[in-house]
Image (cartoon, rainbow, N blue to C red):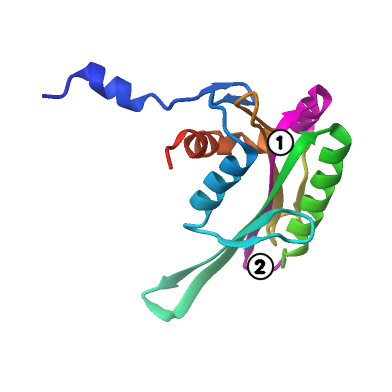
Amino acid sequence: MIKPSDIKKKAEPGYKIRGQVLDYGLKLTTDEILEKFMESYSVYYNITRHTPDFDAEAVFDSKGEQYFLIKAAKVAEMNTSEYVYFKKLKRLTADELTILDKKAWELGISHAKPSSKHKNTDAVLIVIADSVDEDARELARKLKHSKNYKFALHGYSNYRLVVVEATEGKAYFNRQACILMGLVGNILVRRS
């Protein structure tokens, strides 16, 4: 028979969230962390390794349609996409983060095709570093970008940033990326 205490033990996620910081408490190398992300993202995303600016790029595209009784009577169509960029570093400084941030945002929104059928095209940057300077941690929480097309009638673009510090077992998120905390935590604490 299952006891309520057993359920509570199984529901414990294995990581702690404090504000915009996730403490997963494991000592993993940057290579191990990148492979965990690649394994997880490869289920729904198309992954390209070793792009010119990043170690990997994951692309998700989805097209949704609504019909009225038959396919010929199409009511609505919505296209959504997400471009995730991964970068591995020994040490992340604020200057390096600013450069990566700009590249990821520009690359992500360059894929947007605004139209009445476009819902969103989002850009996500995941930086995995052995160590992160204090000013880079603070900057990571503050960086933000968003764009709407024709007052959002033709969709929008948002930017999410995740910085994983391997030696400390912590990850830092910008405000938009807070919705990814559970996903990132589960990826990092999962046993391969």
Q: Position of residue 136 (x, y in %)?
A: 80, 29
User: Is 4 situated left or right of 85 in this image?
Assistant: left
Instruction: Read off the residue under disc 2.
Output: 116
Query: Image quadrant of residue 174?
Result: top right
Regarding residue 162, the answer to whether it shows in the image is: yes
Q: Residue at x 54, y 59 (%)?
A: 45
The one nearer the camera, 186 or 65, is 186
Q: Residue at x 75, y 41 (%)?
A: 89
Type of amino acid under label 1: Ala
Q: Residue at x 50, y 51 (%)?
A: 39
User: Is 155 situated left or right of 134 in this image?
Assistant: left
In reply to whether residue 138 is colored magenta, the answer given is yes
Distance from the alpha carbon under mark 1 to that under mark 2: 40 Å
State the quadrant of the N terminus: top left
Q: Position of residue 6 (x, y in %)?
A: 24, 21
Regarding residue 121, the answer to whether it shows in the image is: no
Q: Residue 129: give its label.
A: 1
The one nearer the camera, 78 or 137, is 137
Q: Position of residue 41 (x, y in %)?
A: 53, 52
